[in-house]
Image (cartoon, grey):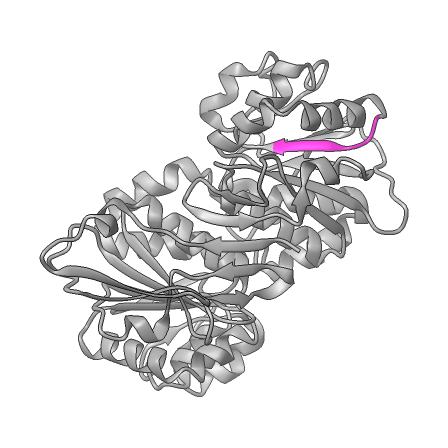
Amino acid sequence: MALLHLRYLTHHSLHSTSKLHHHFRFSPLKSPRFSCSASASTTMAKQVLVPIANGTEPMEAVITIDVIRRSGADVTVASVEKELRVDACHGVKIVADALVADCKNTVFDLIALPGGMPGASNFKDCGVLESLVKKQAADGRVYAAVCASPAVALGSWGLLKGLKATCYPSFMEQLQSCATAVESRVQQDGKVVTSRGPGTTMEFAVTLVEQLYGKEKADEVSGPLVMRSNHGDEYTITELNPLEWKCNNVPQVLVPIADGSEEMEAVMIIDILRRAKANVVVASVGDNLEILASRKVKLVADMLLDDAAKLTYDLVVLPGGLGGAQAFAKSDKLLNLLKKQAESNKPYGAICASPALVLEPHGLLKGKKATAYPAMCDKLSDQSHIDNRVVVDGNLITSRGPGTSMEFALGIVEKFFGRPKALELAKGLLVVRQ
């Protein structure tokens, strides 16, 4: 299973101000831990806390972290467990920057809780986190939660009384006992922002950027994400030259990653395909299992590509990210795998920068219709279908960016398992209305 290591320090973290100090305590037997104290009003970057726990939903955590970091905010990922590493849902491992206990004296401009179960319950049972969020509320600063966490954590702490809030549909009854429950995809009431699930998390995160920096910054961050304009509607894929994608019972899928891969795209592909019960192998294209993704999230692959290349796959699919795509394009082993897939008429795909920087230069889009990240589409020799969010042409599937990644992954599910299965997943994710 893929391991996600989140260790991120912005420029503002590395160069301390008079009001921001990080104190590191090293043990020969344990990973470095740090405690921090800060005055949120006087630091250059907004200070944000994103707690994680065993059972946290990894898409919700990584999307929230990634989008908010794009705004320039300094995001601290803090474990509520005894160790920095947590076991998130769907076999994903996340390593935090700090323990929540080491952040108890920090003043944050925003505290945002991802969902997932039992992650939300583990948040509820963490006394230090409860104290932090209650102080956040008492001091009139922004706090937020998505999925199960509004009902299970915020509601249980009495922090939604008299406020409009939303949550994952199956927790709405619980939410009704502690808030004015509404079915909005994102709900803001005063200093509280709540949302529903993985498929609403990008909207949730952009709303949080607006709370921190204003609408102009939120628009600046959201534009390059290629988000949907029709949130909640059924997703569509554009398919040409229909071809049945075959596998023996369980699809075997290879997802390569490299330094600079876009972590939201990688995690959404991995998470959604694993929800569909595909066997997903995450392979590092570099010399090490651990890679540093584009927004400084550290991912640890299941194996090196050298080992992964010995296996056969029903699909090889590339996440985007400029640095990652450039690394893919330099990997002869990966290129040979992709060419073998194409020559065998077996499925392969790419999203964001990868169609333009990996597939196009190596003849893997020859005679095919495709799309890519908008700023990269001028590199495609055939641009007739670039405005489509997901394009399937026979055994090839391509897509545009972080905001199209769920549709891209659902398109893959649809090709292997059929549209009813894909729509069932899409409804559970809140990509489309239930």
Position of 291 with respect to 144 (left or right) is right
- 399 is within the stretch colored magenta: no
The count of marks equals: 0
Q: Residue at point 61% right, 14% down?
A: 361
Q: Quadrant of the C terminus?
A: bottom right
- Image coordinates of residue 171 in percent, x first then y, are 54, 77
The residue nearer to you, when weighing 279 against 157, is: 279
Please provide the residue range marked out in magenta. Answer: 345-350
Q: Quadrant of the N terminus?
A: bottom right
The residue nearer to you, when weighing 402 against 30, is: 30
Q: Residue at point 49% right, 34% down?
A: 321
Q: Say if residue 241 shows up in the picture.
A: no
The residue nearer to you, when weighing 33 against 380, is: 33
- Image coordinates of residue 252 in percent, x first then y, are 79, 45
User: Vertical placement of 81 versus 302: above or below?
Assistant: below
Position of 126 with respect to 235 (left or right) is left
Position of 358 with respect to 41 (left or right) is right
Q: Choose top left, top right, bottom left or bottom right for residue 338.
A: top right
- Image coordinates of residue 390 in percent, x first then y, are 62, 34
Q: Say if residue 25 shows up in the picture.
A: yes
- Image coordinates of residue 299 in percent, x first then y, are 53, 49
User: Vertical placement of 173 versus 388: above or below?
Assistant: below
- 347 is within the stretch colored magenta: yes
User: Vertical placement of 117 versus 324: above or below?
Assistant: below
Q: Residue at point 47% right, 26% down?
A: 374
